[in-house]
Image (tube, rainbow, N blue to C red):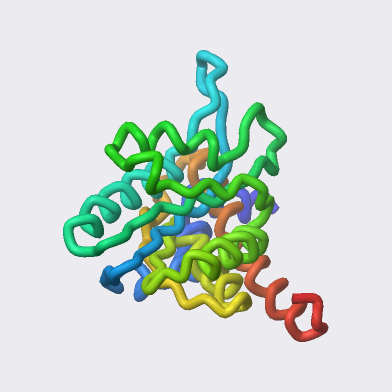
Amino acid sequence: MLAVFWLLGAGWLTAPLLQMAQPHDLSTTPVSYASRTAIIVLGGGTDYNDDDVLVPPHDVLSRINVSAQHYAACRRVAATCEVIVSGGNPQKHRASEADTYLPYLLRQQVPRTDIVLENRSLTTYENARNVSAIVRRARYDSLILVTSAYQMPRALLDFHRFGLEPQPLVSNVRRARLSAIPHYYNFESAEIALHELIGIAQFHVYRAIGWF
């Protein structure tokens, strides 16, 4: 048990877990814009900073930044570009994920009129379910899904479950920090990778027995 603990914390076991959870091909696929394009940003929690202000975690900041950059690029070529921010309040903090992320998009010049908030979903499956209702009403020509590399495989499974085929746009990739001394970041990354791998297995089991 101590050996496993050290291998995770030092990154040597965390690295292959991250490789399994983060397929390389998803992070290299380019995206394209259509006349009516929606950029879907998935939530990834909220944190309280030292001033007790609710803020997006580091990984989510990457999602917000990438979404804002692609919104700007989309606006140069497409008639309609909107950003759908999906995330409720599973942590029971003072505000939902979507509402917490909104000011960060506004600061990056994404106008409020082009932002759609979906602030009720508590899981990735609910992200897909709730967003699917939004996009069907709006009739977009192209969907772009923005999230971290580790969440993308499971997110695509959930969106496919609801008949959507979004283009994957990876915002950031986690990499183990190899060393002789255990680091908290490696334990956190290992937990994230295991959560996603177990979630994928769970999805297939639930589909097999008819729950999804």
Residue 188, compared with residue 70, is above or below; it is above
Residue 150 image position (x, y, % from top left)? 49, 61
Residue 212 image position (x, y, % from top left)? 74, 76
In which image quadrant can residue 196 be found? bottom right
Q: Residue at x 27, y 69 (%)?
A: 33
Relative side of 53 to 71, left or right = right
Q: From this viewpoint, is residue 19 visible?
A: yes
Q: Nearer the viewer, residue 69 or 18?
A: 69
Residue 36, compared with residue 209, is above or below; it is above
Q: Residue at x 23, y 55 (%)?
A: 75
Q: From this viewpoint, is residue 175 visible?
A: no
Q: Residue at x 66, y 55 (%)?
A: 123
Residue 96 image position (x, y, % from top left)? 61, 37
Q: Give the residue at the far bottom of this rendering.
A: 208
Give the total of numbered labels: 0
Residue 142 image position (x, y, % from top left)? 37, 71
Q: Residue at x 53, y 20 (%)?
A: 53
